[in-house]
Amino acid sequence: MYPADYRYTKEHEWVKVTEGVGTIGITFHAQKELGDVVFVELPQPGTHFDASQTFGTVESVKAVSDLYCPVAGSVAEVNPALADNPALVNEDPHGKAWLIKLKLDDPKAADGLLTAAQYEEFVRESEETQA
């Protein structure tokens, strides 16, 4: 369910690094917990974020949740499709619903995040604790 070539955070964001650029989104688990997404607030291109810094919000019918940057870098691009269709986050969270692309300060920084298998285990343990 979670692409093996992505890295994940315990805050339920993912990053895929390609040639020094990190594409960032939220995980399937995050969108499932949020419910129907109705609005996504994203930063302006050129804005710099440190790892773990809030870079926007996602609003659903249930709640408004902060988005946390998994790695440090400057926003190179924001997904324009989400302005007109925030529900993409529910439909394709690991694909068309990417949020931002960052020019990374350190392309190797993502190596320290969770692998897909580690993230799946984290989600499983979290769900067992809540049950």
Image (cartoon, rainbow, N blue to C red):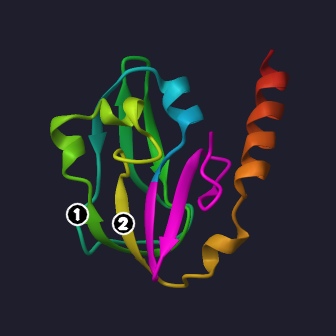
Image coordinates of residue 68 in percent, x first then y, are 50, 54
Residue at image location 61% in from the left, 62% down from the top: 5
Q: Local crowd at mark 2 within 10 Å, few (<14), some, or many (≥20)?
A: many
Quadrant of the drawing holding the N terminus: top right
Q: Determine whether the residue tagged by mark 1 lies in a helix, strand or loop.
A: loop
Whether 67 is drawn above or below 110: the answer is above
Residue at numbered disc 1: 44
Q: Is residue 8 magenta?
A: yes
Residue at image location 59% in from the left, 33% down from the top: 29
Which mark is first along the chain, 1 or 2? 1
Q: Amino acid at mark 2?
A: Lys
Image coordinates of residue 75 in percent, x first then y, are 32, 70
Q: Is residue 123 magenta?
A: no
Q: Local crowd at mark 1 within 10 Å, few (<14), some, or many (≥20)?
A: some
Asked if labels 1 and 2 touch by Cβ distance under 8 angstroms, the answer is no
Q: Determine whether the residue tagged by mark 2 lies in a helix, strand or loop.
A: strand
Image coordinates of residue 119 in percent, x first then y, are 73, 47
Marker disc for residue 76: none
Image coordinates of residue 7 in percent, x first then y, are 63, 60
Please indicate whether residue 14 sits to the left or right of residue 4 in the image: left
Give the number of the mark in front: 2 or 1: 2
**Between 110 and 57, the one nearer to me in the picture:** 110
Number of numbered callouts drawn: 2
Which stretch is magenta? Answer: 1-24
Q: Amino acid at mark 1?
A: Gln
* Whole-number angstrom distance, CA of label 2 to CA of label 1: 11 Å
Marker disc for residue 101: 2
Please indicate whether residue 98 sits to the left or right of residue 17 in the image: left
Residue at image location 78% in from the left, 20% down from the top: 130
Whether 83 is drawn above or below 73: the answer is above
Q: Can you name the residue that lies furthest to the left here? A: 84
